[in-house]
Amino acid sequence: MTNQRLLVFAANLRDRALAHEYPRENILRLRILETHEMTRFQKLQRLLSIVGVMTRIEFKDGTSLTGFTNSAQTARRMAALLQTTTFDTQTMSETNWAQHDDNKPPTPAPSNQDAIQQTIASFLIPGLGQWIQRRSGTALIFFVSWLLALMAGIPVALTLWETLAAVSLRTIFYTSGTYIFICTLAAWDTWRMRKRQNSLLIGS
């Protein structure tokens, strides 16, 4: 949380990408959820953490954002900060529009078409989509994992094709399942870490 915005990031073990951002002036309050307000999964998250809490950020339009905060003290400080901060009457979108020349249109929003192409590329060759997104470290991890799965799958596929020996169903399912899992995981990571449309910057 900054002085002007609440930033929500999508993250994996190595990278993070901005998923959403909300003007501080649109936030009504932040509160810690009671046990009876949590879902079963949220209760499990709470049990696995010693000091973490489930929090809910409520907005003035009636919507809310629920998530896990690693520290109860941090959640309380954020709640106190929201209550004591006075907001500028000018919205974030108005501020960003003012930075543009009157005759110059704002920067167009990114299209999902590129993200779809990157996701497909990463499914076909895990790591390719991450590399296009300039996440070379994650790309290398997926690519090496894919190569290992491919090296394990090729002998099985050749054996089945040439009928050189009997291959158990367990081996077939394990090999193909591992390969498909890596491809699917790489594609999901690419889509999840895509560049999203920033509604605040385009004034929508």
Image (spheres, rainbow, N blue to C red):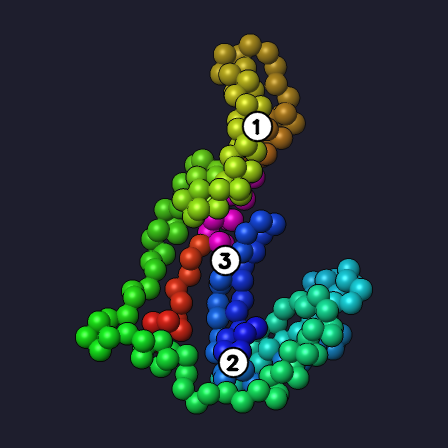
Q: Which mark is residue 17?
A: 3
**Residues at discs 2 and 1 in contact (Cβ within 8 Å):** no
Q: At 65% from the left edge and 81% from the top edge, which residue is drawn?
A: 79
Query: Looking at the picture, how far across and down is residue 154, in whole percent?
Result: 52, 21
Bounds of the magenta segment: 181-193
* CA–CA distance in space, label 3 to label 1: 28 Å
Residue hosting label 1: 148
Q: At 48% from the left edge and 38% from the top edge, which residue is drawn?
A: 126
Residue placed most toward the observer, 130 or 115: 130
Is residue 170 something that shows in the picture? yes
Q: Is residue 178 magenta?
A: no
Q: Secondary structure at mark 1?
A: helix
- Find residue 166 and report its image quarter: top right
Is residue 160 something that shows in the picture? no
Badge 1 density bin: few <14, some 14–19, many ≥20, Cα 10 Å: few
Residue hosting label 2: 24
Q: Secondary structure at mark 3?
A: strand
The mark nearer the N terminus, 3 or 2, is 3
Amino acid at circle 1: Leu
Q: Up-down: is 183 above or below 49?
A: above
The mark nearer the N terminus, 3 or 1, is 3
Q: At 68% from the left edge and 75% from the top edge, which residue is drawn?
A: 75
